[in-house]
Image (cartoon, rainbow, N blue to C red):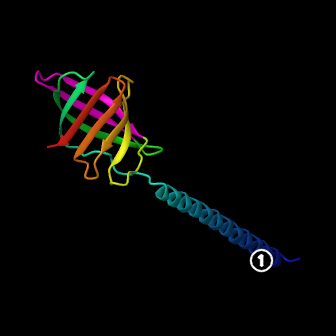
Amino acid sequence: MTTLSFKRMMSLLIGLFLVASLICISAAGQGKGKGRKAKGSAMAAAGIVSNPPTLETPYFCNYTIHGSETHYSTVIMTYSRNMPDNGFLGHIHTVLIPGGQVLDKDMQVYNARPQTDGGIPWSFQHQDGSVVCKEMLVSSDKRKVTFSQCSNTAVQTCNAF
């Protein structure tokens, strides 16, 4: 075998190896894309919520605790990130009226459950566990939020300004 034939043979083998490698890489990429698309479609079909549950505007709230007299507050809920299974982490800023006492807490909103009237019931909790509400019902336009079944026995209804 001459040197020229050997070089041609090696070039051909290297070329075939490169083509086979590109085909394998391309096939692997297509498989991942199909998997992501299928997973995304399944998540959309399951009713995944990608937008924050409330407006990031002030709400005026009235609430009772232990069935006492009605109290008032303003609340602003902001969201920092999405969590798995329809959840959101964020912050709740509450100012009690009268007096102006400020309560700032990290929060989690989770377990969204679609309703036929377009509103969405969620579950809500302060991250430190001081308050857990089994239901935070948000109207379809997000302008009304009602907290109920709370660990501190509070019932609170909030309307966006």
Horizontally, is 26 left or right of 90 in the view? right
Residue at 71% x, 73% y is 15
Question: What x and y, as percent, mark residue 70?
Answer: 17, 26
Question: What x and y, as percent, mark residue 112?
Answer: 41, 45
The magenta stretch spans residue 104: yes
Label 1 sits on what residue type? Arg
Which SS does the magenta portion mostly show? strand
Q: Splitting the image into 4 quarters, where does residue 77 fall? A: top left
Residue at 32% x, 33% y is 148
Name the one closer to the observer, 120 or 59: 120
Question: What x and y, as percent, mark residue 58?
Answer: 18, 40
Residue at 16% x, 21% y is 101
Horizontally, is 72 left or right of 90 in the view? left
**Residue 31 against residue 154 in the figure, above or below:** below
User: Magenta residues, as a range?
Assistant: 88-110
Horizontally, is 154 left or right of 151 in the view? left
The magenta stretch spans residue 99: yes
Q: Splitting the image into 4 quarters, where does residue 100 fall? A: top left
Residue at 35% x, 48% y is 120
Q: Residue furthest right?
A: 1
Q: Which residue is mark 1?
A: 8
Quarter of the picture holding the C terminus:
top left
Q: How many marks?
A: 1
- Of helix, strand and loop, which one carries label 1? helix
Q: Residues within 10 Å of mark 1 (few under 14, many from 20)?
A: few
Question: What x and y, as percent, mark residue 106?
Answer: 33, 30
Quarter of the picture holding the N terminus:
bottom right
Q: Residue furthest left?
A: 98
Name the one closer to the observer, 8 or 20: 20
**Residue 27 against residue 124 in the figure, above or below:** below
